Amino acid sequence: MAGKNRPKGRITNTIRRLRFDHDEMTQKDLAEKVGVTRQTIVAIEKAKYSPSLELAFLIAHVFGKPLQDVFAFELEGDDAPPAN
């Protein structure tokens, strides 16, 4: 349920670095492996689009990494609790 007081945040990711570390995998190659367009991968990398949970897990699986090594959620504002 969305509300006025819901904290705002953003999802960050390490996809670009992971692609580079995996034999310089292209955005197109990653897109084909997870069943989306290259433009979707571009938008996710630039944090312009947040992937579905399923897509996030698929991307992490391609790199053999746990989800938290690929994606992170950061709360915005001064009242954000510290990350674990």
Image (cartoon, rainbow, N blue to C red):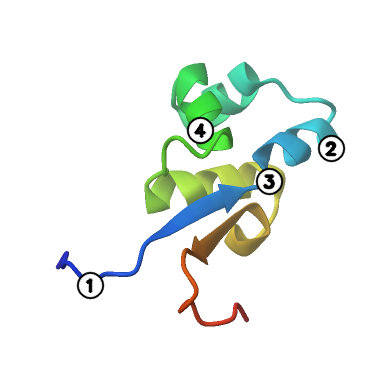
In primary-sequence order, the first of circles 2 and 1 is: 1
Quickly name the residue at label 1.
5
Query: Residue at the location (53% across, 63% down)?
Result: 74
- Left/right of residue 2 with respect to residue 29 in the rendered view: left
**Disc 2 and disc 1 in contact, CB within 8 angstroms:** no
- Categorize mark 2 by other alpha carbons within 10 Å: few (<14), some (14-19), many (20+): few
- Categorize mark 3 by other alpha carbons within 10 Å: few (<14), some (14-19), many (20+): few
Indicate the position of residue 15 as horizontal and vertical percent values.
66, 40
Quickly name the residue at label 4.
34
Quickly name the residue at label 3.
14
Question: Given the image, on which type of amino acid does mark 4 rest?
Answer: Val
Query: Residue at the location (81% across, 35% down)?
Result: 22
Q: Secondary structure at mark 1?
A: loop
Indicate the position of residue 24 as horizontal and vertical percent values.
81, 25
In primary-sequence order, the first of circles 4 and 3 is: 3
Q: Secondary structure at mark 4?
A: helix
Q: Nearer the viewer, mark 2 or mark 3?
A: 3
Question: Given the image, on which type of amino acid does mark 2 rest?
Answer: Asp
C-alpha gap between disc 2 and disc 1 = 40 Å
In primary-sequence order, the first of circles 1 and 3 is: 1
- Categorize mark 4 by other alpha carbons within 10 Å: few (<14), some (14-19), many (20+): some
- Categorize mark 1 by other alpha carbons within 10 Å: few (<14), some (14-19), many (20+): few
Quickly name the residue at label 2.
21
Q: Secondary structure at mark 2?
A: helix
C-alpha gap between disc 2 and disc 3 = 11 Å
C-alpha gap between disc 1 and disc 3 = 29 Å
